[in-house]
Amino acid sequence: MALKIYNSLTRQKEVFKPLQAPHVGMYVCGPTVSGESHLGHARPFITFDVVYRYLIHKGYKVRYVRNITDAGHFEEEGKVADDKISSKAILEKLEPMELVQKYTHLYHWAMDQFNNLPPSIEPTATGHIIEQIEMIKKIIKDGYAYEANGSVYFDVLKYNEDYTKKNQPYGILSGRNVEDQLDTSRELDNQDEKKNKVDFALWKKAPAEHIMRWQSPWGEGFPGWHIECSAMATKYLGKKFDIHGGGMDLQFPHHECEIAQSTVCNHEIPARYWMHNNMITINGRKMGKSYNNVIKLSELFDGSHPILTQAYTPMTVRFFILQSQYRGTLDFSNEALQASEKALRRLMEAYEWLKTQTFQTGSTAKDKTLDVQINTWLNELTEFMDDDINTAKVVANLFEIIPTLNSLKDKHITSDAISGDTWVKTQQQLELFIENILGLKVESGAHRHQLNGVIDLLIEIRKEAKARKDFATSDKIRNQLTDMGIHLKDEKDGAMSYTFD
RNA sequence: GGUCCUGUGGCCGAGUGGCUAGGCAGAGCUCUGCAAAAGCUCCCACAGCGGUUCGAAUCCGCUCGGGACCUCCA
């Protein structure tokens, strides 16, 4: 079965065909490292991590490029740069690289917490100023950009006029037309420098107080908002590559501008499939800086944000995100996260137990119906992923299988209910989908050898107490362990198992 | 104002013209010294009003509600 993905450019699901199989080039817009990542940022990174993992599973050799935006108009969030006061001492100055360093580290830390695979290349905007300048020069040379007072702007109307003839008007991705925008664009600084209000900056002249600045043919300045992605994507993935991903809010203007820039330079739309994840909302409203409703990832992980009733682990957050399909909005609430936390625990406990079991292949199923059903559920996992990465349905099917696993564990059924082949397949498929594709892993900070030894000892004592019906002692052991977040459970055969919070 | 999306049970969320989504919460039962887990069962929803159809939550229209983008934004 073939992978189908929804292409924002054509507004329909399309069979995925790489330009040069088995190679796949994928570019995803990364973070601006002027502040800490929040829950909303986690969605694209987890979504495209799963896309990356799935493409690899499909046998593709993927080059996954995800940039870091570290150039531009930078100030630390919530702080006003004190340039006037600090001009004397270098150490008192706001040093952009210091911010970039700090937030890049935090971002990498968060990605690691989420168990996201690192991209193949993670280029920075500041590391590609030359490429951006070269690209701008080419756009000017071809007549689609003009210099004005040390800044350079893209001539949207000219582009639109010429490329509409080639069936590729400005607005092709987001479904807008330039005429509408001429009426609605808001007033911005230096509007008068532009020929038209819809034109966007490729290069901006740096005001005297602006700290980040580079030499260019047009004087000292810094690159515009959209050119870095075009330059870096072209450099590492070529003029035309397979997948371009990012959040829906980047569709316009960011990706639209990328298309225009790259089309002028490379004569074609840079990417074949455009994938956009939807937003995470909170009380129905998009989580975003401008709405002042963001929950930073560090706050989520330690529960310090006022709206949170508790801390949530990175895997809980990852699972929460994967329980929905990436193209729909996802509404945050404590209740929803708590539901994910419990569900994930049930999933992982059943899966961890399954991993420890050994099954012989062959044999026949005593419960033919169940055997067929399990195989159907397992086979559907691939179908669902192939259908535009529907992780919500994948997760739902995993939960269909769990009762059977727990039934075997609790000896409600015997292992010959389904065939040995099916058991082995179940083990293989669950490992593949849970760990390799969804990227979920067991979070086991408290598991230590010594601790396990101590618990084993307590279990021994408790067993002895139970044997002589000394329930006061046995309950004391269990209750106090529970208070510490260690849950003892009496199994059917008299054994005791335990789990950590 | 322009462009577009959306409205599913207490909550989060899949979904297809006719067949149980799934999770969490809630109720009952089984197991158990008790508990916790787990299993089984129940809770059968699709904003409203029309229309198309043998049949619509799923297609069309209208009404009402919510949201996104048009500015940096994942």
Image: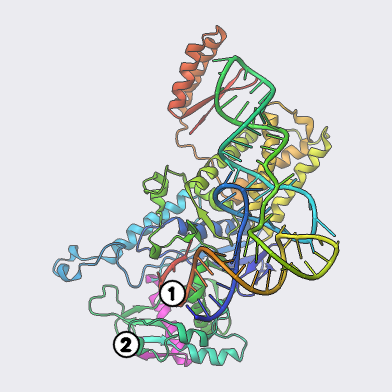
Check residue A150 for magenta coloring: yes
Query: Tags 1 and 2 in contact by the CB under 8 Å rule?
Result: no
Q: Which residues are magenta?
A: A126-151
Binning the other alpha carbons within 10 Å of mark 2 as few (below 14), some (14 to 19) or many (20 upward) gives some
For the point 52% across and 50% down, the residue is: A318
Residue A109 circle label: none
Quarter occupied by residue A125: bottom left
- Look at 23% across and 79% down and name the residue there: A208
Q: Position of residue A334 (x, y in %)?
A: 47, 46
* Among the two numbered marks 1 and 2 on one chain, the one whose residue lies closer to the N terminus: 2
The amino acid beneath tag 1 is Glu
Q: Chain of mark 1?
A: A
Picture coordinates of residue A374 (x, y %)? 75, 42
Q: Position of residue A206 (x, y in %)?
A: 29, 80
Residue at the image point whose x is 23% and y is 76% from the top: A209
Task: Read off the chain for label 2.
Answer: A
Magenta-highlighted stretch: main secondary structure? helix
Task: Give the residue at mark 2.
Answer: A150
Q: Which residue is mark 1?
A: A228
**Residue at x-position 75% and y-position 33%:** A360
Q: Based on the displayed image, in which of its 4 quarters is residue A210 positioned?
A: bottom left
- Name the quadrant of the N terminus of chain A: bottom right
Residue A108 magenta-drawn?
Answer: no
Q: Answer with the quarter of the image where residue A277 lies.
A: bottom right
